Amino acid sequence: MTVMEVNSGDTAWILTSAALVLLMTPGLALFYGGMVRARTVLNMMMMSFGALCLVAVTWVLYGYSIAFGNDVVGGLFGNPFEELGLKGMMKDTGAGLPPMAFVAFQAVFAIITVALISGAIADRAKFGTWMVFALIWSTVVYFPVAHWVFDFTMTDDNGTVSHVGGWIANNLKAIDFAGGTAVHINAGAAGLALALVLGKRIGWKRDPMRPHNLPLVMIGAGLLWFGWFGFNAGSAVAADNTAAVVFVNTLTATGAAALGWLLIERIRDKHATSLGAASGVVAGLVAITPSCSSVSPLGAIILGFLAGIFCALAVGLKWKLGFDDSLDVVGVHLIGGFWGTIAVGIFADADAPAGVTGILGGSFDQIWRQLVGAVAVLIYSFLLAYAIGWVLERTMGFRVSRDDELTGIDETEHAESAYDFGSISGGLRASFARSPEVDAGVAHDQEVSA
Amino acid sequence: MKLVTAIIKPHMLDEVKSALEAFGIEGMTVSEASGFGRQRGHTEVYRGAEYTVDLVPKIRIEVLVDDADADDITDVLVKSARTGRIGDGKVWISNVEDIVRVRTGERGLDAI
């Protein structure tokens, strides 16, 4: 076996991509934060930052090993003890891409997937319980599902298997290039489960609950789009032709999706809104995520445009079906991720890097693989998220009290307020806004003395 | 002395203010308000959901005047604030017991 050197081009691109994808989580915090009402924006952003910090630790401790350790049983999860604490991974193995670069790149995927869920439970979740949920869900759902989808079986030069990966990638051979199933269907299904466990916000359907700061939403969507080039093009795990094709598909599908969303809004609601543009951008990014390596740029335009239309229509479903998926995690990520995953089986172009053919090319072989992968992740994530949420609600309590919800959880969970413009408050609007019960609490005294 | 209070559509403020200045009022107070009248708000569609907006944004104008000017100023307000469409607002006149200018302590008509 020849001794290889580190490929500096690939390594530079993957580390850069990891940084790009990391920025998506603060971007998501802005995107979600602007969409909630002024009295809960900090909590909304904190749920993303909390997930970021937590998973940055658990990924190193055991997450990477569950996701990318050698398969233990039937392609379901990797050996958690194999790379526990990333032991033995610091030395230079001579691989083209240092293993740690891959560790870093995959870490930020785990982070944003957990953060995505929080949009479904805006305005009403206890922060502490959210953190416990994030810990358990990432451990028993995300890390195994990442193994299913992202961990490829490898063979060495002699043809012997040197690493055994997960079932969706290797046995089913569904194509999920950057995480339509593992990230978006996964987070969307968990969001739906938590929205059902926590129930509707007080005033749901009666109050408009319109976004309090749309410029934040637009900045967030912009940062997500920017970071998504790392998410998708970085998933080539090389600075190569595949990365370049994927980059262009990520650009064009996203634009087309926002146009599709705005068209639906113009027809249905009479106005093309900035929230619609931002949501359309994210819907397009979600849909092109699994499919970016298997479609042509023209296919990406059609796929993205339809994603914008489907998701714009899907966000209306919660009003009809009666679940408070506050920031449309289901409508955008579950539906968009599902569509993008299935669309591989429809639009796949044999000339694209993935080299598979979809229905439009005359092959029906890929679509059932896509469907099985998507449904499997959806059901697994939904059931486990529901169970975890249900137990937490009955033990720690997941939903805040009625008083706290009406006061606003920025005050009651974090003892802060995002905007303190009132001239009579002198930086203490917190204490003015509170109900008497909350005023009696310790946090208030600390705030006054500070 | 009277207090003339007007509730008007926000976008009519500039026109109403110019008309009052042209009439020669000594001062006015303007504040943002919200409310509904006989039109009972309206329904809006946002992100595919229809909901009722029952408190519509309005502007509240208050002017302290001499008894003799009250009717004229009311006319100026009504004329300048009218668009002829639903939600144009209301103007009412109320009696004022006394007025004090904070800086000088002047009372009554001198304080207007």
Image (tube, coloured by chain):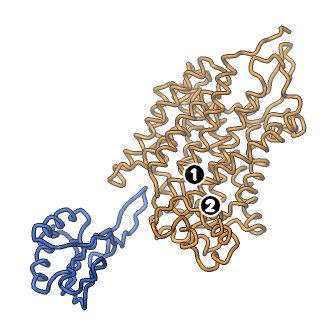
Q: Is residue A308 left or right of residue A16?
A: left
In this view, A235 is above or below A92? below
Residue A27 place in picture, x, y as percent: 56, 43
Chain letter of disc 2 in the image:
A
Amino acid type, mark 2: Ala
Within 10 Å of disc 1 (Cα), the crowding (few <14, some 14-19, many 20+) is many
Q: Give the residue at x 55% y 43%.
A: A336
Which chain shows up in blue? B
Name the N-terminal-most of marks 1 and 2: 2
The N terminus of chain A sits in image quarter? top right
Tell me the quarter of the picture where residue B109 sits.
bottom left
Position of A67 relative to B37 (above/below): above
Marks 2 and 1: in contact by CB < 8 Å? yes
Rendering colour (chain A): orange
Q: Are marks 1 and 2 on the same chain?
A: yes
Residue B84: tell me if it is visible: no
Secondary structure at numbered mark 1: helix
Dividing the picture into quarters, in which one does residue A342 lie? top right
Q: Residue at x 70, y 41 (%)?
A: A110
From the viewer's side, name the closer residue of A210 and A319.
A210
For the C terminus of chain A, give its image quadrant: bottom right
Circle 1: residue type: Val
Which mark, residue A195?
Answer: 2
User: What label does residue A329 carry, if any?
Assistant: 1
- When the figure is inspected, residue A338 is found, relative to residue B27, above or below; the finding is above
Image spot of residue A36 (x, y percent): 52, 58
Label 1 – label 2 distance at C-alpha: 10 Å
Residue shown at 64% from the left, 67% from the top: A447
Report the side of B82 relative to A215 (left or right).
Answer: left
Residue A16 location (% of width, % of height): 64, 27
> Can you name the residue that lies furthest to the front here?
B104
**Horizontal relation, residue A90 to residue A343: left or right:** right
